[in-house]
Amino acid sequence: MVVAAGDGAVLLDVTGPLQVFALAAKCGGHYRVRLASPDGRPVDTQEGVRLGVHTALDAVTGPVHVLLVAGCDTAPAGTALVPLAQAVQRVSGRCAVVASVCIGAFVLAEAGLLDGRRATTHWASCRDLIVRYPRVIVESDGMYVRDGDVYTAAGVTAGIDLALALVERDHGAALARQVAQWLVLFLQRPAGQSQLSVRGRARPSRQPALRAVLDAVAEQPHADHSLEAMAARAAVSPRHLSRLFTEVLGTTPGQYVQRIRVEAAQQLLEAGDDPVDVVARRCGFRSVETMRQTFHRVLGMAPTRYRHQVQKGATDA
């Protein structure tokens, strides 16, 4: 497998996946890991550490099992994006899997490898990816995205998640779990974990009325947050408040409250052993059944299964 990087690479985007594959090789996985740059010269990372490389990308011969592109400087005036993208494009036809970490997705997009595909990148760069490469179907939520044999990871530690997923794909869960245990990691992060919480994804609002409502929901998820109650708290009409949510947050008031309550419940399920009915009550759900239905709608699983998966993941790590 080949990890490709150019000047301005993020150090952990390179070394995180490299560590996973190198350790997998020691544990019996069939990986020969090589670090490549567009011209074969050492790579100067964003952190000021210079990395020696094994080869130039154009010098890579024969089939490549995995080509993984590390995040690098993708600013319009940057010098790393175009030559790296051109080299990746030339090699990609001989690759069984092409992947990227963080803003390495821009390299794949520049090479035309993401056209018509679902992909992700670091949350702070998702909108830029959409604007610069409109043929890419950008998914701003989630840690990594697979579309066929093309994988893109959100960034930094998500690159490690992606590397573990590829090890599991190649050699099964037992070897991937062994690698995760050595690195003291989850083999798979708890389901439903996204790059940012729903509140963290919300753009700061200059609307005092909306800020007051958002703060109230976050601070007291168990309180009455019906549309009428929130509108009264904000001193605006329910219709106006609904419009503010749609314009600023891209969601409805009810959906926002549901996600905040689910996140609050996730924290309680992860951190303690309170019965599910107690968690439901503390987070504002009318009943355990209401919380179960909402968890299924938002996370695709029941609260009890979520707690089991989190606890099992912590044990495995």
Image (spheres, grey):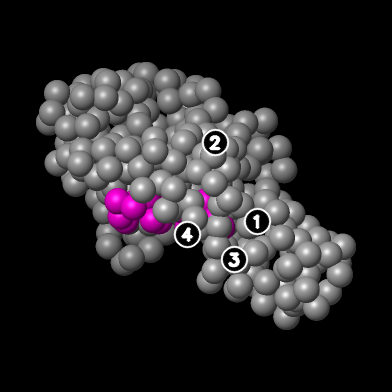
At label 1, counting other C-alpha atoms closer than 10 Å, the crowd grade (few under 14, some 14-19, many 20 or more) is: some
Q: Looking at the image, is mark 3 or mark 2 earlier in the sequence?
A: 3
Image quadrant occupied by the C terminus:
top left
Q: Badge 4 is on which residue?
A: 282
What's drawn in magenta, residue-wise? Answer: 260-274
Looking at the rendered image, the disc whose residue lies closer to the viewer, 2 or 4, is 4
| Residue indicated by mark 3 | 223
Dominant secondary structure, magenta: helix
Residue flagged by tag 1: what amino acid is it? Tyr
Q: Which of marks 1 and 3 is in front?
A: 3
Binning the other alpha carbons within 10 Å of mark 3 as few (below 14), some (14 to 19) or many (20 upward) gives some
**Res 256 visible:** yes
Q: Residue 293 carries which label?
A: none
The residue identified by callout 1 is: 256
Q: Distance between the residues labelled 1 and 3?
A: 14 Å
Q: What element carries label 1?
A: helix
- The CA distance from mark 3 to mark 2 is 22 Å
1 or 3: tag closer to the N-terminus: 3
* Location of mark 2 (residue): 296
Q: In this view, does 256 lie above or below 204?
A: above
